[in-house]
Image: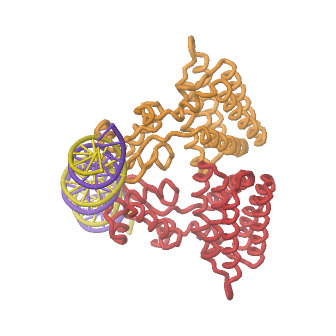
Chain colours: A red, B orange, C purple, D yellow
Amino acid sequence: MTTSSERAYHAVKEAILDGRYRGGMRLPEDMIAGELGFSRTPVRDALRRLNSEGLVEIAPNFGARVTQWSQMQLEEMTAMRIMLEGYAAQLAAAKITPEELDKLLQHNDAWETAVSRSPKPDIDGIANSNLRFHRTIVSAAGNKFLTQAIEPLWHLPLVMKKYAMFSRERLELSRQHHREIIAALSAGEPQWACEVMRTHIVAARAFDAELAPDAASEAAMWSETDAAE
Amino acid sequence: MTTSSERAYHAVKEAILDGRYRGGMRLPEDMIAGELGFSRTPVRDALRRLNSEGLVEIAPNFGARVTQWSQMQLEEMTAMRIMLEGYAAQLAAAKITPEELDKLLQHNDAWETAVSRSPKPDIDGIANSNLRFHRTIVSAAGNKFLTQAIEPLWHLPLVMKKYAMFSRERLELSRQHHREIIAALSAGEPQWACEVMRTHIVAARAFDAELAPDAASEAAMWSETDAAE
DNA sequence: CCCGATTATATCGTATACAATTTAAGCAGA
DNA sequence: TCTGCTTAAATTGTATACGATATAATCGGG
C-alpha cells in the first residue's frame, strides 16, 4: 500500500499540472487535507516535496502557493532543457539498449496515433507520449543527477499544454525530429543525437514564441491573486 | 526567529558535510530529535528536504540514511559540473555586475589567504571560500533553475574535502585558474569564461584521480553498515 | 546444529491538539 | 476620508499519542 503522503503528493501535483490549481493560488494545508480526506501531516509532506521540485512556493507561517513563472523564467527553463536534453541524447546514443530503443519506438507510435486522431489531435495523448519519449532518452543516458535536474523542467510544458497551439506544420516537424532522434540513437551517433534533440527543443520554442506571442506569458502570469482584485 | 525545521535542516546538513554523519549511517528521527532537542516533526521536515537534495535517502517505514555515492556516480556528478558551471560562467560573463565582480575578488583573496597559511594550508578555509567563489559566478549567471541544478553537486567536494590531497602544484594551478576566470568575466568574454571554468573542474578531477586513485572511492563507499560487520 | 515460524523491538506514518505567527478587519481619532 | 492602532481570524509550527510496518531476536522443531 502506498502511503498517504505519496498519494497526496500525486493528487496535488496532478491538480497543478491539469490546471485545476492555477499559478498563484494558495494551497492551505487544511483545505487540501479536507479535499483528499487526509490529515494535515501527509499534505504537509506533499507540499514540501512539491516545493523542492519548484511546483509550489512556501513562505514561513504563510503557507504554499502554486508557483507562477515569469516570461523570463520560461526562457531560462527552455535554455536549460536545450543544454541538458542535448547532453542526455549524446550520452544515450552511446549506451542505449535494444529494450530502451523499443520502448522509444512504442512511445513514438503512441505519439503519432495521438497526432493523427480525427477529427482533432489528442492533446493529452500528445503531451503524455511526448513526455515518455523524452524521459526514456534521459533514462537511457544513465546519469542520475542529469535525470533529477531535468525532471522539474518538464513541469512547464505540462502546465501549458492547454494553451499550446499545435498547428499541422508544427506537428509534422516534431514527427520528423522524433524519427531523426531515433535514427541517431539507433546509429549510435552521439553528436548527431545531441544536435537533433537541441533542434527539436529550439524549434518548439520558436513555435511557442511566434504562433502565440502572448499565450505563454499569459498562462504563466495569470494568477489567482490578480483575479481576486 | 528561524523555525525549528530550518535549524534542524542546517544542523543535519552540517553534520553530514563535516563527516560526523558518514555515508550509509542511519538517521532515525528520534535520535536526531533527541540530539537537537526538537520533536520528530521538524526533524522529519529536515530529513525530507535533505532527501530531495540528495544528501540522504529515505526508505518507507525504514527511515533515512546518509547517501553514499559510488565511484560511477562521482564521475557523473563531475561531468554535470563541467557542463553546468561552464554554462554558468558563459552567462555570467555577459551580465556580471561590478558588485558581483568585487565579491568574487574578495572570495578569491580569502581563498589565497587560506592557501598560503603557514605552516599548513587551511583546508576548511579553502573549501569555504572556493564554494563562495563558484556560487557567486552561478548567481551572477542569473538563471534560477541553473542554480538549483548545480547546488546539490557541490555536496560532493564538501563531503570529501577531508580526504582531498592539496599538493602545492594543484593549489598553484587552481590559483591561476581563478585569476583567469576573473579576467574572462571582467572582460565580458563568455566563451573564454566557459572554457577556463571547464578547464578548472576537469583539472581538479585529474588531480583527484591521479594523486589519490582510491581515496575518492574509499571516502564515498565507506559505510557505517560495512563497518558494523 | 541448523532452519523456519513467532514474538519483540525499533522505527516510521498519521492524526490530533495547542501554541505562535501572520494577515486581514474593525474601529477610534484626526 | 484617511491613518494608525487594536483586535479577530486564518494558517502554519511543533509536540505528542497511537497504530502500522519492517527488521532483528528468540524459540521450537527437524
Residue A45, quarter of picture: bottom left
Q: Position of residue B15 (x, y in %)?
A: 42, 34
What residue is drawn where x is 38% and y is 49%?
Answer: B45
Q: Position of residue A215 (x, y in %)?
A: 64, 72
**Can residue B186 be seen in this snapshot?**
no
Closest to the observer, A54 or B206? B206
Horizontally, residue B38 falls left or right of residue B83, namely: left
What residue is drawn where x is 64% and y is 27%?
Answer: B213
Q: Position of residue B119 (x, y in %)?
A: 56, 11
Q: Does residue A160 lie above or below C19 as drawn?
A: below
Closest to the observer, A10 or A65? A10
What residue is drawn where x is 69% and y is 74%?
Answer: A109
What residue is drawn where x is 47% and y is 35%?
Answer: B223
Q: How many marks do you count on the picture?
A: 0
Q: Does residue B210 lie above or below A216 as drawn?
A: above
Q: Does residue A53 lie above or below A31 as drawn?
A: above
Horizontally, residue A42 falls left or right of residue A224, namely: left
Q: Does residue B140 lie above or below A113 as drawn?
A: above
**Can residue B105 be seen in this snapshot?**
yes
